[in-house]
Image (cartoon, grey):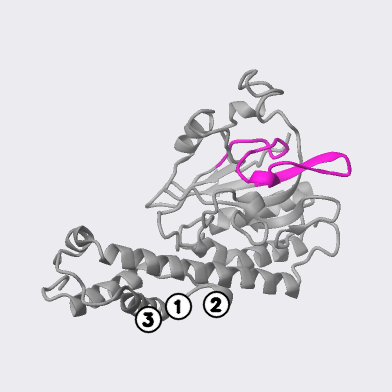
């Protein structure tokens, strides 16, 4: 059994073999794994430890999914607590094919870390949400305890993957993320290079996993490329969402106190205008930033003021 000492222990019934009944042969979660991979997630909402526990313990509501850890947002939006729901050597089902896999005749698998968020478009990172320090401490302990290399998740020739990754990480997202959502959110993805580098640096001065596992320049370049790809996808999604919302009179009335008169731009012209707003805002990738949703909103308000005949927002 491996339990993280600082975490609040809220172990799910899935930790006990056969706990969820015969409809799940062998008992859901009864499988032991050798942890070799850590996957970071977002709840997509500001979820508490109690809400996560009650949801995951219900096999119908959670559809057989659970995570190893749940990290809340810090005050004032949350309580900033870290809870452990599964033993790290028990299979936790939240990452598709990475939950458990065979390597040299032994069952390996991923430790999953869910984290609270403040909702769409998930642009805030762990630092913004007051979660970074606890996440780094947890990652350091997991790497030390289980010999997991502090590198961006990568394939292992013997089967499966090793390292620290995120749910929608290319090119493995089709295997790990069957719903194809942008998890753990572009803000947190943008912070992954610095998170991993910090973990590797901490481990360099402490008992470490096997040698040769320092974060290489290739790993840094790879995760920056992935982050840039995710940021580009987010910008496209934000643009498309804004264009769609601006076409809805009720949105303009409810959100901006404006008018239901149509905007005098074609879809292509409106998309180009919104692209200019988003492009002017610092973003992720190698800069480590994220989409500033407040700045996007301010730009959209200005656009509305220009394009509709009545005043939208003073």
- The answer to whether residue 207 is visible is no
Q: Is residue 162 above or below residue 311?
A: above
Query: Element at badge 2?
Result: helix
Is residue 211 in the magenta section?
no
Which residue is at a point 67% across and 67% down the rendered structure image? 197
Residue 91 shown in magenta: yes
Quadrant of the image for the N terminus? Answer: top right
Real-space Cα distance between discs 2 and 1? Answer: 8 Å
Label 1: how many residues lie within 10 Å, few (<14), some (14-19) or many (20+)?
some
Give the side of residue 203 with respect to residue 45, left or right: right
Q: CA distance from mark 1 to mark 3?
A: 12 Å
Q: Position of residue 160 (x, y in %)?
A: 77, 50
Q: For mark 1, what is the residue? A: 282
Q: Tell me the residue at 30%/69% (across/down).
A: 297
Tell which circle, 1 or 3, labels the residue nearer the N-terminal end.
Answer: 3
Mark 1 against mark 3, which lies toward the viewer?
A: 3
The residue indicated by pointer 3 is 276
Above or below 273: residue 253: above
Q: Which residue is mark 2?
A: 287
Measured Cα–Cα span from mark 3 to mark 2: 19 Å
Do callouts 2 and 1 mark residues in contact (Cβ within 8 Å)?
Answer: yes
Mark 2, Cα crowd under 10 Å, few <14 / some 14-19 / many 20+, is few
First to last magenta residue range: 83-111
> 250 or 269, which is in the foreground?
269
């Amino acid at each position: 059994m491996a339990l993280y000492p600082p975490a609040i222990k809220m172990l799910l019934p899935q930790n006990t073999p056969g706990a969820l009944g015969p409809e799940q042969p062998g008992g859901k979660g009864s499988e032991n794994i050798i942890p070799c991979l850590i996957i970071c997630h977002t709840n997509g909402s500001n979820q508490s430890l109690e809400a996560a526990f009650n949801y995951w313990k219900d096999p119908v509501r959670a559809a057989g999914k659970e995570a190893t850890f749940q990290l809340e947002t810090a005050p004032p939006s949350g309580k900033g607590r870290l809870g452990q729901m599964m033993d790290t050597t028990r299979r936790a089902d939240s990452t598709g094919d990475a939950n458990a896999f065979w390597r040299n005749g032994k069952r390996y698998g991923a430790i999953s870390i869910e984290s609270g968020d403040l909702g769409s478009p998930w642009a805030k990172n762990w630092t913004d949400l007051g979660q970074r320090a606890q996440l780094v401490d947890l990652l350091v302990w997991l790497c030390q305890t289980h010999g997991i290399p502090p590198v961006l998740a990568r394939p292992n020739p013997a089967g499966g993957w090793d390292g620290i990754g995120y749910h929608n990480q290319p090119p493995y997202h089709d295997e790990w993320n069957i719903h194809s959502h942008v998890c753990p959110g572009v803000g947190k993805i943008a912070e992954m290079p610095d998170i991993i580098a910090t973990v590797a640096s901490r481990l360099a001065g402490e008992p470490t996993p096997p040698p040769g596992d320092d974060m290489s320049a290739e790993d840094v370049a790879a995760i920056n490329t992935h982050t840039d790809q995710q940021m580009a996808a987010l910008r496209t999604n934000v643009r498309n969402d804004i264009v769609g919302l601006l076409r809805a009179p009720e949105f303009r009335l409810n959100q901006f106190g404006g008018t239901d008169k149509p905007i005098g731009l074609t879809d292509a012209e409106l998309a180009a205008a919104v692209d200019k707003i988003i492009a002017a805002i610092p973003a992720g990738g190698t800069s480590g930033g994220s989409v500033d949703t407040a700045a996007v909103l301010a730009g959209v308000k200005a656009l509305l003021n220009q394009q509709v005949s009545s005043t939208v927002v003073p």
